[in-house]
Image (spheres, rainbow, N blue to C red):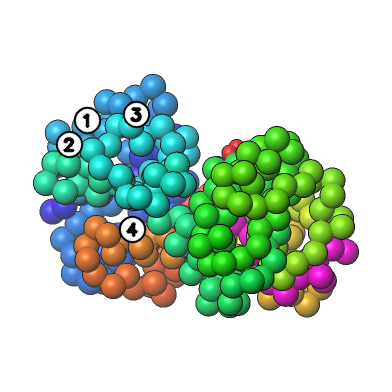
Amino acid sequence: MNVYGIIGWPVSHSLSPAMHNAAFKALGVKALYGLFPTPPEALKEAVSGLRALGIRGVSVTIPHKEKILPLLDELDEVALRIGAVNTVVNREGRLYGANTDWLGVYQALSERISLKGKVVVVVGAGGAARAAIFALKEAGAEVLIYNRTLERAEKLARAFGARAFPLEAISRAEGDVLLQTTSVGLKEDRSPVPEEVLSRFKVVMDMVYQPLETRLLREARQAGCETIDGLTMLVYQGGEQFRLWTGLEPPLDLMRQAAEKELEEQKDGKF
Ligand code: ATR
């Protein structure tokens, strides 16, 4: 039985165990995916533990995505450019770090709209925005970053060839796609984007997936935009992790169903 899991702090609400265990079961892979809650001060020991115990792979989440880089043996070139690892593969004792977050964003958007030459407004400039902006630039989009702290947006803009604006200027923003990467709207009925701005966009995507339809997505739908929820990206990045670990085609529909079911159960307090 191969063991996989997720290291982060906290991890108790992660949808990844449901998603990956459903995929393992469906494809007859003898493997288990569990939670490895890892406080910040224990990261180094936890990484040594992966080697010692022969854990075959882990997902890496907040707050370890950046700090784990120097602890690994080998890094994927893209993970290095983004500066974040969300996937570790144990290759005969050598730990290889990759990033599938950017692919999650890329796939979620590309199946709805061709990004080449399009203007994409990104709200937020934190860790989640980094992988997203990398994906957008890879796809040939023009990227405008709006953030509460302008300096952070400017730093990201310099790193990836984008333009930076303060969040207050969002009322004048326009483009083809709007991508929300902050935590605003998570378990609350709030949106960082005024409603009247939304009709200027064709596609609106939110990285928040709790609730599945955030206030931003509800208002975007009412304004006639196409909407993409945060679970879409989560499932695609998970699918790419599954592919890296097993070499198999990920059963994406099934993974989505499992993640949605887990989300529902957590909402009902049954965990
Ligand atoms: P993550 O890794 O999840 O992206 P992060 O690096 O802490 O987390 O970034 C959080 C992002 O959400 C930032 O863009 C942050 O804005 P600041 O750079 O100004 O801190 C944004 N954010 C968080 N709470 C916000 C709020 N109430 N209003 C606007 N932006 C907010």
| Cα separation between marks 4 and 3 | 20 Å
Between the residue at mark 2 and the residue at mark 4, the CA separation in whole angstroms equals 19 Å
Q: Residue at x 27, y 33 (%)?
A: 47
The image quadrant where one finds ligand 1 is: top right
Give the mark nearer the N terminus: 4 vs 3: 3
Q: In this figure, which residue is indicated by the disc labeled 3? A: 43
On the question of residue 259 being in view, the answer is no
Disc sitting over residue 241 in the figure = 4
**Residue at (72, 74) in percent of width and height:** 202
C-alpha span from label 3 to label 1: 9 Å
Quarter of the view holding residue 267: bottom right
Q: CA separation, marks 1 and 4?
A: 21 Å
Residue on which disc 2 sits: 51
Q: Which residues are magenta?
A: 195-207
First-in-chain label (3 vs 1): 3
The amino acid sitting under disc 2 is: Arg
> Could you tell me if the residues under marks 2 and 1 are in contact, i.e. CB atoms within 8 Å?
yes
> Dot 1 corresponds to which residue?
48
Identify the amino acid type marked 1: Ser
